Amino acid sequence: MQIITLTSDMGLTDHYVASLKGTIFSRTSAVQIVDISHDVQPFDVSQEAYYLNNCFRDFPLGTIHVCCVDSEPIINFGSSQDSAVPAIMLFEGHYFVSNDNGFFGLLLNNAKPEQFWKIDDVLSNPSLYRFPTKNILIPAACKIANGEDVSTFASEAEEFKRAFNITAVIGDNLIKGNVIHIDHYGNVITNVTRELFDRFGENIPFTIYFRRKEYYIDEISPTYNAVVPGEKVAIFNSNGFLEIALNRGAKTTNGGASTLFGLTINDIVRIEFSPRGSKETLDSLF
């Protein structure tokens, strides 16, 4: 059975998502629809790419991912850089159907796709732009699901918009990262990866600072339950990103780490390392 996933900023209080699903069922049979999220912040393709990058590999090869955020085409005949046209990308055996609004570059980071196509016949019917996800992206996804060759309705292309995520930077005995996501529990996910952290070596003392100097953590725990309930904790999550959390904390109960520490998207998180000889006095370690 073919799987089609949906990721959008449409929410679930309106009829929009139901309309997308009805259109899929009307155009193809034996398909399973999976909702990744419909709570992406409006027009935030970076958050959309974050959600997909953290879960698409869990789906079978050949899965079709319809990426619905900021899907209205922008046609600028004077500059292709200012245009945003519906497109299809094959990456790691998965199909991604999206407007070329920077999403593809965010998903890929520095990787390269297997193939990339721009959907044909977008200009001939501007009325489709009124609900472009339903009228352009979903039909393209259904054609793939029905076994149609992408080259019969899309033209192969080389160029796509290359938006990039904010990356953590390394200084002298320092990593400076940013908050890139706050999850349902209020856990704070940063762009500091385990790989980047490990470059400083094993058993090097460090301190993670966030928001204010009095908020800090000086160890990485293997799990949330490694600390007592309500205590702050730093872990590397299943996707390899540094996460700051409260054990058994949640936004709906005690506020979670984001509320307690006043952390929001793009806030800076600093990790200061203290290798032997890097501090002038013992007191300066604390």
Image (cartoon, grey):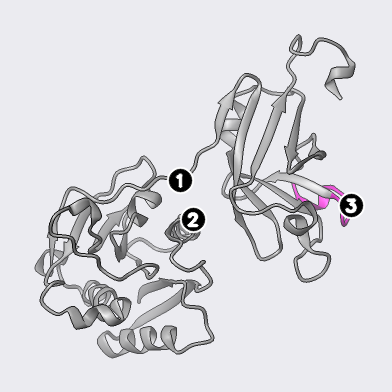
Secondary structure at numbered mark 2: helix
Overall secondary structure of the magenta stretch? Answer: loop
Task: Residue 210: give x, y in percent of width and height.
Answer: 73, 41
Q: What residue lies at 48% left-to-right and 75% top-to-bottom? A: 35
Give the answer, above or below, for where 262 lies relative to 121: above
From the image, tell me which residue sits under label 3: 228
Secondary structure at numbered mark 1: loop
Secondary structure at numbered mark 3: loop
CA gap, disc 1 and disc 3:
34 Å
Task: Residue 91: give x, y in percent of width and height.
Answer: 31, 53
CB-based contact (under 8 Å), mark 2 and mark 1? yes
Mark positioned earlier in the residue sequence (2 or 1): 2
Numbered range of the magenta stretch: 222-231
Residue type marked 3: Val
Task: Residue 286: give x, y in percent of width and height.
Answer: 87, 25
CA gap, disc 3 and disc 2:
30 Å
